[in-house]
Amino acid sequence: MARKLRLILGDQLNYQHSWFQETDSQVVYLLMEMKQELTYVKHHIQKVVGFFKAMRAFKEWLESEGHEVIYYSLDHKKNKQSLTDNLSKLIEEESITTFEYLLPDEYRLDEQLKDFCDHLSIDSDSYDTEHFLTERSGVANFFKKKKTYLMENFYRMMRKKYDLLMEDEEPIGEQWNYDEENRNKYKGKVPVPDIPSFEHDVQGIIDLLDEQDIATIGQIDAKRFSYPTSREEACALLKHFTTECLPHFGTYEDAMHTDHPYLFHSRLSFALNTKMLHPLEVCKAAIETWEADKDTITLAQVEGFVRQIIGWREFMRGIYWEKMPDYKEKNYFSHEAPLPDFYWTGNTKMNCLSHAITQSLENAYAHHIQRLMLTGNFALLLGVHPDEVDQWYLGIYIDAIEWVEITNTRGMSQFADGGLIATKPYVSSANYIHKMSNYCKDCSYDYKSKYGEKACPFNSLYWDFLHRHQDQLGNNGRMGMMYSMLKKMDEEERDKILAQAAKYKEKVNDL
């Protein structure tokens, strides 16, 4: 009797996939919790718990729909903790005649499964996850023979292709991008919505991780795990975003505040990256809410959100599949410094970094500006090796899967690809941080000072970074003004700044 085994990975929980629309008594689905996926990097405990909880909910849903499921918990007696070892044994024990899997979104798993199938004695095949809006090669084909990839051009093509915020093939509002309106500081005048919590009790999973000696980072509230772990909960979170957060999302998209870790952000990335939600339904839900309430929600709010989903998210995935595995080795500036110890504790006198890192350890979350212009910015100014930055970002955030993490980290944040993704390094002094947050108000350091005992480290390190890399960046048109200022800087002033930077780098763990 023919028997088919279908593998579902932890980030392939697509309730709407065509595989699951009809039952077949000859098909058995397989989900596994494995040490293989828990040890290649040290993950945040909320990330591990979130994946396990979501996988278990998906298993229950499959069974409720009449599908046969084999589920290996981490402590299952047959679990060999290896993807291929488990598959080999199951294929033998269950008399499997055909093996099928959904295309992984991580290069290492894609290679592992291709190699496994090359050595199988039974039939095998792979299928699309039916989640992304572009093929793996979509970005590569769009930018064929181009040296640099401008996301804005890709984004406009995607708007046209999916007819989002378009009218007669032109952008609604006669403007493609409202990024200039998405850079406001939050000053507390607009109430921030309460954070929806699904309050899962996950003590059992936490105990399991302890019993299996799984090393993790970060904290967790065992009685109130608040991320969505089913499609029903993901849809509820999407509804909360469109009704409560969207009216002010774009306006304060880049803002940072000590009292509000989420502000008006959606917190949908985990649900999206595990495929519980589809990017098109997310965009359409936001657009429909805007269309129904244009008096309250401006076009800039919804455009900024749609750009993140169909522009940036799809763009980064395309870069990943074109440039891997070489992309993982990129280190344009030849940076070698270690990541400061306080990235693992939040124990630093720099209020902005202390807050962003502590928030990350507590919530497995920080929004894109906190990641790019605080933790990423400081690591780049300091000259941290991109490998160490990658490992930190991949482990600490609940939404971090390599296809989206490494392109944002090594490309956008660290400029390690030499400008393929970003047209300039995303570095700044303390002035930007003060402009976009309230972090500087109660900080031990003075955001206005470049040198001296209380001088903000971002300032001297910023000029030191420009000075160190002027051969590589001096001709970058977007940095011309800053290099002009560096060139005109009084020599004695410059030497004081560089000396301050050297002092800070020498005792970085004491900052």
Image (cartoon, rainbow, N blue to C red):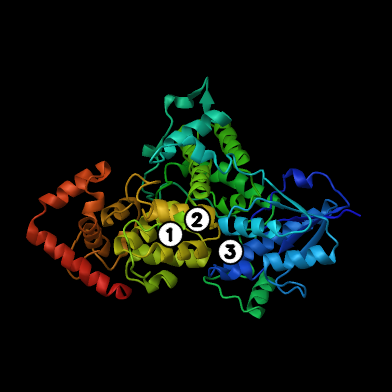
Residue linked to disc 3: 47
**Amino acid tagged 2:** Pro
Q: Position of residue 377 (x, y in %)?
A: 34, 58
Q: Which mark is residue 325?
A: 2
Q: Are marks 2 and 1 in contact (CB under 8 Å)?
A: yes
Mark 1 residue type:
Glu
Q: Label 3: few (<14), some or many (≥20) within 10 Å?
A: many
Q: Are the residues at dot 3 and dot 2 in contact (C-beta closer than 8 Å)?
A: no
- The answer to which of marks 3 and 1 sits earlier in the sequence is 3
Residue, disc 1: 329
Q: Secondary structure at mark 3?
A: helix
Identify the image quadrant of the C terminus.
bottom left
From the image, state whether disc 3 or disc 2 is nearer to you. 2
CA gap between label 2 and label 1 equals 8 Å
Residue 335 image point, x, y percent: 33, 63
- For label 2, the SS is loop
- The residue under the point 72% across, 74% down is 75
The image shows residue 5, relative to residue 85, as above or below, that is: above
Q: From the viewer's perspective, is 393 left or right of 380?
A: right
Quadrant of residue 224 within the rendered picture: bottom right
In the displayed structure, does residue 485 sit left or right of residue 90?
left
Q: Residues within 10 Å of mark 2 (few under 14, many from 20)?
A: few
